Amino acid sequence: MANECELDFPFSQACENNKDPILAHLKTLLTGCQSVLEIGGGTGQHALYFAQSLPHLTWHSSDVASNLDCLARRIVHASLKNLPEPIKLDVEHRPWGCGRFDAVFTANSLHIMSQNSVENFFTEISDHMNAQAQLLVYGPFKYEGEFTTPSNASFDEWLRERDPVSGVRDFEWINALAHRAGLRLKQDLSMPANNQLLVWDVHSSVKS
């Protein structure tokens, strides 16, 4: 069988750069998990790498219809028992109808969504989290309205020039949306390249 280098799979350098720092935390955070829903699987690099590295859990990747074929090609080629074919999922189309999971993971997605899409994301998310599930969100954020670095400010400007509805999100706004969804901030982890890994869990009173 041809290896990935010989196939024309889409490639993200950012995914390649951040997969090991993210995995280092996932190994601890997802110890007791059996299933993960990834929202915005993109190129599938994360899905494949994390599924290979965390064989105790089933990694369910998903993306919008326009990205699904590329994501599915890498996943089908990998042929891992714990990496099923991806789910078609658009945060704008509720309900998602994809079941419940022990964790939900998304990377570099909230800043390319519109504000309305981010709100839909948090409105729907708790319906797909088991009791004691976690939500893990990786990406850049502002704090108290301020960028953490000049490079993140430049990135925000580039995002808005490309798509005016996108942009680096305020941590306080995101955390408020999560709180309204019945989630409680567990960790705010600093990551390389001026990113964060935000981790919420479900309030015990929400899931019974």
Image (cartoon, helix red, strand yellow):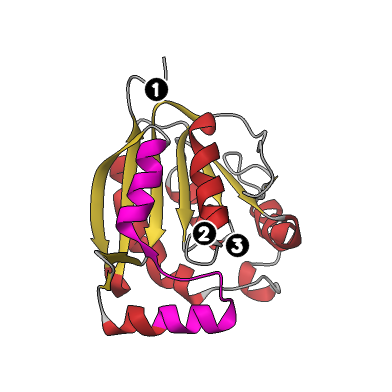
Instruction: Give the SS element for disc 1.
Output: loop
Q: Is residue 172 above or below residue 160?
A: above
Instruction: Estimate the spatial distance between the alpha carbons at disc 3 and disc 1, rounded to whole Å.
Output: 31 Å
Local SS, label 2 = helix
Amino acid at the residue labelled 1: Val
- List the residue tagged with mark 2: 115
Q: Which residues are magenta?
A: 155-180
Q: What distance separates the C-alpha of mark 2 from that of mark 3?
A: 20 Å
Q: Position of residue 12 (x, y in %)?
A: 54, 73
Characterize the magenta stretch by its predominant secondary structure.
helix
Q: Answer whether residue 47 is magenta in the image.
A: no
Q: Which residue is mark 3?
A: 42
Q: Which residue is mark 1?
A: 206
Nearest the viewer among 166 and 140 is: 166
Q: Do tag 2 and tag 1 residues touch (Cβ < 8 Å)?
A: no
Compare residues 117 and 108 and report the one nearer the observer: 117
The percent position of residue 202, horizontal first and vertical second, equals 36, 30
Identify the element where label 3 is drawn: loop
